[in-house]
Image: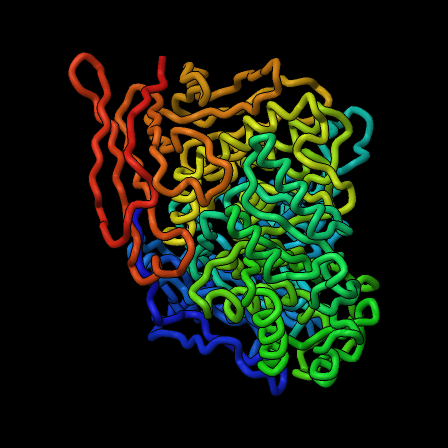
Amino acid sequence: MTHTLQCSVCVAAALAIGAGADRLSSQAPEPAQVVRTAVRATTLDALTPVTSWAKAAPGIWRATAGNASREIRYTSLAAELPRLDALRAKPDHAFPFASDPIAFERTADGKTVVRVPCAAGEKLFGFGLQLDGLDRNQGVFTLNVDHWSTGGGRTHAPVPFYVSSRGYGVFIDTARFIKVYARVGNRKDSPRNPPPVDRNPPPGDPAPRWDSQPDADAVEILVDGPGADIVVIAGATIADVVSRYNLFNGGGALPPLWGLGFWHRVHAAADADRVRREVAEFEARRIPLDVIGLEPGWMTKSYPCTFEWQKKRFPDPPAFVAELLSRGIRLNLWENPYVSPESRLYKTMFPLSASHMVWLGLVPDYTLPEARRALIGQHAQDHVGIGVSGYKIDEVDGFDVWLWPDHASFPSGTPAPAMRQAYGLLMQDLVFKGLFKARNQRTYGLVRASNGAASGYPFAIYSDAYDLKEYITGMSASGFAGVLWTPEIRSARDEHDWIDRMQVVAFSALAQLNAWASGATPWHFEDATGMVRETLELRMRLLPYFYTAFAAYHFDGVPPIRPMAFEDAALGHVADQFMFGPSILVAPFYGKGGWSREVLLPAGKWYDFYTGEFVGDGGRVTRQSDTGRIPLLVREGAVVPMLKEPVANTARAYGQALEVRHYGTTPGVFDLFEDDGRTFDYERGRYRTRRLSVEAGEGGRFSLKEMVVKDAAPPMFGRSELRVMTR
């Protein structure tokens, strides 16, 4: 892993968000090359080619279609500035649309259509956090924030970014509603339409296959506004394109180490005594626990919210938080953004909020500095100042009747639909920058909706979708979207289902049980408790490996949870298995077929994680288990650093000895990232990189060699010893 430091110069120009709004960032473009594309001979006369592209970084270009001068750009809401140093370290690529240009036109009702050429045989992925599959080769997707649909575009994170198997990606950098026609809709003036087919030929004539949706030669994107910025990204592979997208948006989030432990959200009506009892039982049952999440009952009023402590349930919040911290446990608070008339913020927020309410609560306009300062001040005093470590931001994902109407007005002049698309980002921005980064204190949290340019925010999206296969699909889909995702567990139909769900969660970006309604605990099914404990202990043991994967997300833009398309574009359709970090393939059990499943292996040799047994060299293999232990496969030559022993929480991981596993018959290397795990000092170069090299010696014996590549922080973990796994 190559670590690079963030540059202070930003490529993406930030725009004011609506009339009279202050800018949330002052990003200005660096001197840019302008690429003028050669316009090919075409009969698409109604379209205007986009011919002037500003080169923002190697392999990245930006241009505007139409008039986008008053639009919200997602890049202006990014958590961090573009990581230009990391992007400049990458090889350059040719502009992918030099001879076949992207074009646009205005519709009769003032909207903008962007037309991106698409070649036959291209495979497309992306368009946000979709839960109905990964292929986006043909279809219509309405990219609007919504929480009920699992496909079709309405989703928790309708990110207007897609990537092609040809080695490019396209990002529409606007918060307007977007409708995508991916290879749907044939223009009459296109020179590349397929020939029409007679569906009812005369008797004796051949009857070729008739297609109700003939393949179009472009992705057409309808933007509900007068214009939009377009970002084109080129790379060597799908993974390279996605990493450049993430780096362009500031790099990925690096959560605190405690964020990667196990989280338990207690029942909504839980009080301090119930929390204490549950924490004690976690300890008695030796089940890891790092974070307690309080649901709506912690407030005096919720739906809408006061953001103030319910003293009947929590009579002494500072002492309660301090007690948890003394046991190595962090506290995360649920909230939605809508301000109750009984909140002390109500009077201040009234003139700073929208014309319409949500659940009779004010909707603050968080593009306004005054509104941001008011919430930050109250949260700092009542929560963060006494040791609260983060938030779960709920109810920013509704559509139409669930939130405010499209004709609602905001004091900044921001259009209501654009505000709805960006509201989850605005809340993440407020919490991350205003409450935590300002204190040099890392946080990790949950959010119900996100959108483009969000990779730098330390929030995992959670969902109202509870189908286990959809959970697993979300793991892969998040890798294309530049967001983090956690499949939510609330309950299960039986012990078998409970084990399957807990194991999927254990290999997600944020591992949690949400018992807000069920009151369930990890030992909800007593006979399954042993396997649940084993799974959560394994997650804890993998902390050094997984934390380093998050460091790669920050420094290099490569997501910690990766779809199979990153390994091989031919496996891009595979939605029920994924990569956990660089070397571990996770193939969860799901459904009613028992603990047996087929796994598609990328090219190369793969080994069983638990035993080191050789599994296969590409192709299809079957994995099964009597106990439900999740199938984990490891690539040839992999080096996997783990804690030698499991720990009860991450506070006890510091200084622990490492077991460095090696798989296969070829040497391998792993650059272990270490820092304080709590602050942003790593952004100033205060971190340590320990290179763990497994080398082959005489007689085929392997040995472990350590070398400190960068020594700017104390070690996070202790001594290491090699364990050769291959039999």
Depth check: give the residue in front, 598 or 536: 536
Residue found at x 55% / y 83%: 22
Q: Quadrant of residue 532?
A: top right
Residue 36, percent across and down? 40, 68
Q: Say left or right for 670 vs 107.
A: left
Specify the quadrant that holds the N terminus: top left
Q: Give the answer, above or below, for where 175 lies relative to 25.
A: above
Specify the farthest residue to the bottom.
20
The image position of residue 536, as x and y in percent, is 55, 33
Judge whether residue 71 can be spotted in this image: no
Query: Which residue: 56% across, 24% down?
Result: 630
Residue positioned 29% across, 59% down in the render? 685
Q: Position of residue 597 (x, y in %)?
A: 61, 20
Q: In x, y percent, where is residue 452?
A: 56, 60
173 or 167: nearer the viewer = 173
Q: Residue at x 56, y 31 (%)?
A: 286
